[in-house]
Amino acid sequence: MQTVTVTVTNSSRRPMLRTNVSLRGPAGWTVGPESIDVRRIGADESARAVFDVRVPTLREGFRMYPFTATIAYHGGDRLDTASQELMLTSGQPVGSIAEARNNVGVTTLETRADGDFDGYGNSFSAEALEAVGVTPGAVLEGAGAEFTWPDVAADQVDNVAASGQAIDVGTAGSRIAFLTSGSGLNATGTVRVFYTDGTSSEGTLGVPNWTGTGANPDAEVVAASKGRNRPDGYGNENGTYSVFATAIEVDPARTIDFVVLPANSSIHVFDMVVS
């Protein structure tokens, strides 16, 4: 059994006379009591409500557990409610985007059987990417950032198919830029940013399909290659298959602890840069 404390601060000039605090935890977690009535809270004063939380056996790997505190109050400057979310985590983030790679998105004609960018055995052509300047270790620019193309062979994992992976960062900046491409028409999801002071923020990562359609038409095209490798060989010669850059805003006054990618495997991240 653990405890969670909710602190209510009255920032108005009048006392809060009737305040009720409730706490909702993740599915499978037991929180008690359901709600707590708090004493009179004077102007510029605070009061605490302490809840008992029974924690189930935690699953392995990195996990996020949302708690939402809701306060209904009468007095102060109004009759109203307010809510605040706290996201607890368990497990450890991986050390870099490279450590999280789990998909082979680029192949040569000879190694095409090893690739499966889109779930149908198709992949970017390494030869076609090379023709537009995208080679292992190349520096690419987009969304106001400099990216490094994965410095791996064309039959090795080179991108992260997003599934909620937590990536260690440990630096500050105003934006997080992503070198990315989509393998579906709905390659969009929420990026959650955790700061070293315990706070967090969110941003929406929307990525066009590698054919250029779908989510976020404002994403910047970084490289556009002709054709792709299919299970039966190089094909779709008249088609264009692209890699994009897009970014989300973060608080530059706080240091980023780690970033959690969306749980949408049609989003493929080749690099991630704080700028």
Image (spheres, rainbow, N blue to C red):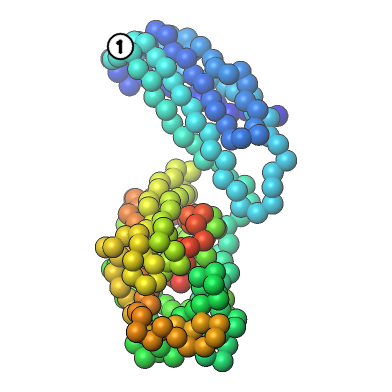
x, y (%) of residue 82? 39, 24
Vertical comparison of 109 with 200: above or below: below
Sort mark 1 into few (<14), some (14-19) or many (20+) by Cα contacts within 10 Å.
Answer: some
Q: Name the residue under label 1.
A: 14
x, y (%) of residue 100? 56, 66
Vertical comparison of 107 with 253: above or below: below
Q: Residue at x 44, y 64 (%)?
A: 184
Residue 52 visible from this viewpoint: yes
- What quarter of the picture does the C terminus occupy? bottom left
Q: Which residue is drawn at 29% across and 69% down?
A: 220
Element class at badge 1: loop
- Give whichever of 228, 72 is nearer the camera: 228
Image quadrant where residue 240 sits: bottom left
Residue 133 visible from this viewpoint: no
x, y (%) of residue 65? 57, 41
Q: Which residue is drawn at 40% across and 61% down?
A: 185
Vertical comparison of 133 with 167: above or below: below
- What quarter of the picture does the N terminus occupy? top right
